[in-house]
Image: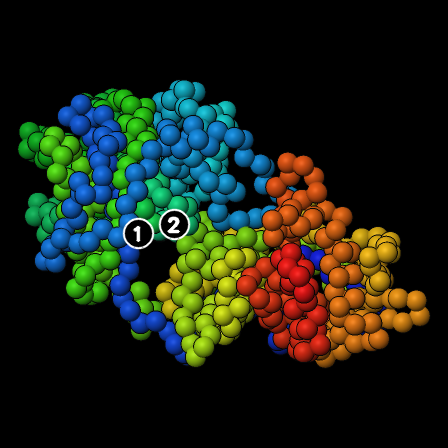
Amino acid sequence: MRTARFIAVLPLFFVATAGRTAPAPRPRQSPAAERPLPASKVPAQQAPPQPGTITTQTRLITVDVIATDSHGNPVRNLKEEDFQVIEEHLGAQKIARFEFVDTAARAAADSVAQPAAAPGMYSNMPASRLKVPPTVLLMDALNTGTQQQVQVRRDMILFLKKLPTDTPVAVFLLGHTLHVVQNFTTDPKLLQAAVDKAHRPTELEANPQDDAQSASNIERNSPLKVPEDVLERLEDFEKEQYMEQITQRVEETASAMLSIAKYLGGYPGRKNLIWFSESFPLWIAPTADFGSQPFEGTTNYGEQVRDAAEALTDARVSVYPVDARGLEPSSMYTAAQNPNIDRRNPGASLGGTLRREDDERTQSQATMEEVAEDTGGKTCKNTNDLAGCVQSALNESSSYYELAYYPVGTKWDGHFHKITVKTAQHGVKLAYRRGYFATNTNAADQKPPAALLQDACSEALPSGAIALTIQTLPLNPVPGQAAGAKYLLTVSPSALSLAPGDGSHRLNLQMAICEFSPKGDSFQFYPHDLSQPATDALFQSWQAHGIRNIFDYAAKPENERLRFAVLDVPSGATGSVDVPAHPREFANIPELRGPVASSASTTAVASSAPAPAKSSEPLITHVTFRVGTTSSSLDWSGDKLWYHGDIGINQGAPAFFKSIYSAKFHCDAGSLISNEPGSSAKPSFLFAFRNPAGPGALVELGGSEPAYSGNLTVDPSAKAFFDYLWKLCHCQQP
C-alpha cells in the first residue's frame, strides 16, 4: 500500500542530536484515507478563502525588441530614451525596465566552467545562468510528411556539426504526444544523435476531393451509375471526417505548444522555438463543388492558434516556423502522387487540384505567420536552405533590447491589445511581439485547484512558471512500514502571490504528488494544501531560502516516476518537476558528526551525533550539553521544542555553535567565512527538529532575526537559545 506523508517541518539540513528515545508508532491513516484517487476521480475542490488577496489586475508587459540596420546587422548602441512604446487606444507608455542583452559579451564574461548538478537534485530550472538564449528544435512529425522529415533531419545534422559550443539547444519530437529527445545541452554530438532519432513515419490525410482512393471518387469513377444525391451525401461525410482529422492535429499541436510555453516560462529572458513543420490550415473554407452542403466540414482554428501564441508570448518564447516543404513543385508533377482526375472534365479537375493545393499551402503558411508575428519570431518559407533559417534565428537572438511597462488604463477583458515600438534612430528596423491579450488572471471562473494540479501532471513537459527544486534525502525507514523515499521540496517565492495580511503575509499554495504507471499513461494523485500565514521574519526567510517542505513517499515497486506539482491559487501559475520514485542518488545534507573536544574557552560540549540510523534505530530527539556532572538539553521529544537543565544558555548556545561551525568556518568582517583558502562554501543556518510522532519545527537563523515555522510549538526557552545562537551566527557579541 502506498502512503504519502507530509512532514510539517521545512528544510532538513541537519539534525543535531545526542540522547535518544524510542519513537512513537508512525501515525497511520484509515484505509480509505490512505488510498490515492486516480486523476480522473479526484473530486473538484473549490479554492479556499483568500484573506488579504491582492486584486489589482496590473501586470508587467515585457517586449523583446530586435534592432537591425539596413544590412540586417544588430544595432547595439540604443538607449532607453531612443525607444517609445505605444499601446493601441492608450497612447505612449512609461518604460519601467530597460536592458540591452548582448549574448556575445555575456558569454565572454561568463566563460568559467559551470559546476555539474549535485547528485540527488532535480529542478525545472537550469543549474546555472544560460549564457545565450536557449533554443528548442521542434521536429513536428504530426504535421509533416515522411519525405520532408528526412530532409529536415539531414540538414540539421549537418548544421549542428558547426553549432557554437556555447549555444544551449534541446530537441523535441511532436507526434500525437510531445517527447523530449534531448534536453538542453551544448554538446553537438548529443544533439546530432537526438535529431537522428527525432522522426516518425507519417501519412498526412489527403483532401478527399483530390484523393483518387477516397470512397466518393472511387464510386464516381466506377462504371456503375451511382445516384448523384448518394455521392453528394458521401462527399459531405468525407468532408466532415477530413475536418475532424485536421482538428485532432490542431488540438494536439496547440496542446504541445502550451506545454512548451509552461516548460520554458521559468527560464529567464528570451527563448527560441524553431518549429520544423508543414503546419495546418488556419481555417477550412466552404466548398460548393464537393458535396451537397458547402459549409459541411468547415471550421476556423484561429482560437486554438491564438491561445498557443498567447501562452508562448507570455513565456517570452519567440517562434521561428520553418516550412519543411522548402521550395518544391506542385505535388501534381511528382511521381509519388496519384491525384484524382475527373474523366468527364480533366482540365477543370487538374486546375481545381492545383488551386486547392495552393490554397492549403497558403493557409498553412498563414498559421506559421500568425504564430511568428504574435511571438516576435519570423517565418522561413519557400527555401531549401533550412540550416540558413536556423542560423538566422540564432543570429537575431544574439542581441536584443528588453523593454517592460505597466499598462496604464488597460481593461483586462481578454481582448488583444496591439503594441507599437518606435525608435528615434533613423534607419533602424525593429522586430517585436505585436501585442498581448489582456487576460484577467484573477478570474472567478478559474478551474478548481485540484483540476489545475491534474493538468500540471498531465502535461507532456514539467511546468516552469514557478521554480522548484527537489532533493532526494536518505530515508531512515521505520520498522514494519513500507519502504519509500524522502523528498525536500523548495519553492521559489518569486512567482507567488504572497498577499499581505494583518501584520503578516498569506501564502495560498496547493501541491500534489503524482505517481505514474510504468507506461506513463496514467497517474495517481495526492493533493496537499501548503497554504499558511507568515510573519515578516518567516516571509524574509522565504525570500532568502525559498519555501521548503519535506515529504515521505512510498511508491509502488514497478513505478519509476513521480511528478511534484505546485499551484499558486490566486494567479493559477504552476510549477512541476519529475523525480525518480525510487532514487539511488541522494543530496549531500550537512550533519553533526563526531564528538567535539572540550577546550579552555568552551565550558559546555554538544554530544556527538551518530551516522544515519539503520532501520532498527530510533529517531533522535534532543541535544545534551554537559559540564562535569551538570547538564542541559535542547529537547523536542515531547509536544514542544524547549531548553532545560542546569547549564545556562550563555554556555549551551556557544557550545552548540562551536560544534556545528568551528571546524569549517570562522568570523571575518562580520560574517562566517570558510576555513579553506579560496573556498566559497557558505554555512547553512537552517535547523529542522522532527518529533517521532510527526510534528516538527523549522528554525531559520539566516534572516534579520530568528524565524520559526512548523506545527511543533517552540517554547520561549528555546527561542532565547536561538536568539543567542543567531548573534553568534552573525558574528555579533551576545
> Circle 1: is it few (<14), some (14-19), or many (20+) Cα within 10 Å?
some
Three-letter code for the amino acid on which mark 1 is drawn: Asp
| C-alpha distance separating marks 1 and 2 | 8 Å
For label 2, the crowd category at 10 Å Cα-Cα, with few meaning under 14, some 14 to 19 and many 20 or more, is many
The disc at residue 314 is 1
Instruction: Point out the image quarter for the C terminus.
Output: bottom right
| Amino acid at the residue labelled 2 | Gly
Q: Position of residue 86 (x, y in %)?
A: 14, 51
Q: Residue 66: x, y in percent?
A: 24, 36
Which residue: 30% across, 52% down? 314
Front-most of residues 542 and 245 = 542
Give how far across and how far down residue 23 sits, in percent.
80, 71
Along the horizontal axis of the image, is 601 left or right of 485? right
Q: Is residue 277 above or below residue 721?
A: above
Labelled pair 1, 2 in contact (Cβ < 8 Å)? yes
Q: Identify which residue, 284 or 597, lies in the foreground.
A: 597
**Which numbered dot is residue 265?**
2
Q: Secondary structure at mark 2?
A: loop
Vertical relation: 172 (above or below) 505: above
Q: Nearer the viewer, residue 498 or 338?
A: 498
* Quadrant in the picture for residue 719: bottom right
Q: Residue at x 72, y 47 (%)?
A: 664
Please provide percent x and percent y for residue 311. Answer: 31, 52
- Mark yes or no: residue 614 visible: no
Seen at 18% across and 23% down, the residue is 71
Mark 1 vs mark 2: which is more N-terminal? 2
Outermost residue, right direction? 629
